Image: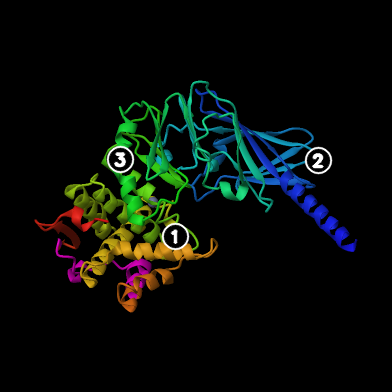
Amino acid sequence: MARSILTLILLLSFNIYSSAQQKSFMDYVLSWDGESSILKVELTYSAAQKDSTVFIFGDPSFGGQKDIFNVIKNIRCAEPEVLKIEEADRRITVYHNGAKKHKLTYEIDGSLPADKPTMVSQRELFRPVITKGVLTLVNKQFALAITDKSNPLVSFSWHSYPEDASYFNSVQPSQKDPSEKLSAHYDEISNLVCFVMGDNIEVREYSIMDVPYYCVTTKEDTYGNDLQGSLSPFFESYFQSIHRFWNDTDFPFYFLSVTALQNNQKEIGGGGFGIKNGFVMKLGRVFGLREQYVTAHETAHTWAGIKIMLGEDSFDHQWFGEGFNDYTAIINLVNSKIYGREEFLNYLNDDNFKQHYESEIKGAHNDSIAANYWTDYANYGKLPYRRGFIYAFYLDNQIRLASNGKFTLRNTLLDLYALRKTKKKDEILTVEDFINVGAAYLDKKELAAQISRYMISGQPIDFNTVKLIGEFEVEIDETIPKVSLTERADLLKIYQW
Ligand SMILES: [Zn+2]
């Protein structure tokens, strides 16, 4: 008897616990008319026994965002609730005053300020694209962050939307009806949610090594792009190549979203960022060689940068997360025949060696990068990419030479990925791990000294004293290294897997 009472008490307390958990929710209902730059958001949420609820909008590491309250507007709650907005901290507090139900409404303005369109597309990543026929929206651009640990169930559904519009969502991409509710727990949604919608949107589906891939683009733009056509080589060869490079098809799906900015400006460049299972690009020009590169770089981040990251934060060791990622992207462009000799050597010499060795801040310490990244993007924005790319190329050559061609940098990266998989989710990969893995291919002390000297202190590699594999030759023009291929060298043989 005593035992069954205990069981009953346990069951009861479990029920109370689980219903308290279930009660915690955030339900977003979204509306867009298909024409305007305004997204209307209605958020119903739980606030169990609290006097007030605090929300935060935006994330300063997501592209600056000084004028964030020009993006989020007309924030309202219903009486008796009262709002307090602290712009400096991007903080929205709702005092409930006894209200049992809680609803917040606001608007997200996706129009681009006409005075600085380039900045907007490349650096103000927090701005969504909401314009006639096109809506591109990720959760950081419209959803609110909470300040407690309640981990509510977050759901999204569309209340009004243009009838004949194409629609894509990155939570459940097979789901085609915008009015159907999508749900995920709060701690799972950061970097997960992307909506693309509009009558100027086309969604094409591919199957690559049994992984569903989605190509989401604008259909027509003022630059004359055929984006589905421009992106098809990625779906026909690049993604296959990079899956083989990493020996990995462990994905539920992957998507690319490339939408042209339609704001009557001339060429305004483009900007992109990766989110879970996909990448989102805002394009303000013709899709050309540079955009091919950006697509390759961003999609390669699935591994270096996302699945495999060194340090606590993506800013800690960008030489790896950006630079090594960049190297894998370029050699996969070669492997998939999108890049030939000329494109490869141009990228190596003109975009990396020349830019890096001419840079006045090429010797900046690794720790000074994060602080200057958004404020001096022209200099610091690309520094870790180039520094890491050049080192990855150098390291690849060293590993090939030390093993007589048996091993390449790819073997080290695969070992690092294998090590990552043995770690728990909250454990980080460290530079020490990188050195330990590399020690199977190169002298450990020498490798540790190189990383400390070149990647952390920031000293440029002196290519006067560097030996490369027989297929590459290097000459120093003034102080700038320039690599060429010997006549019999075959890039496709060098970069094969
Ligand atoms: Zn990157």
Task: Examine the rendering and report whether any part of residue 260 can be seen.
Answer: no
Vertical side of 425 occupied by 279: above or below: above
Task: Examine the rendering and report whether any part of residue 425 can be seen.
Answer: yes
Amino acid type assigned to the residue bearing label 3 in the image? Glu
Q: Residue at image x 90%, y 61%?
A: 1
Determine the residue located farthest toward the bottom in the rendered image: 445
Q: Which of 341 and 13 is in front in this view?
A: 13
Q: Residue 236 carries which label?
A: 3
Residue labelled with disc 1:
309
Vertical side of 422 occupied by 235: above or below: above
Q: Magenta residues? A: 449-472
Vertical side of 269 occupied by 303: above or below: below
Determine the residue located farthest toward the right in the rendered image: 1
Q: How crowded is mark 3: few (under 14 residues within 10 Å), some or many (20 or more)?
A: some
Q: Is residue 462 magenta?
A: yes
Circle 2 — which element? loop
Q: Residues within 10 Å of mark 1 (few under 14, many from 20)?
A: many
The C terminus lies in quadrant: bottom left
298 sits to left or right of 469: right
Amino acid type assigned to the residue bearing label 2 in the image? Asn
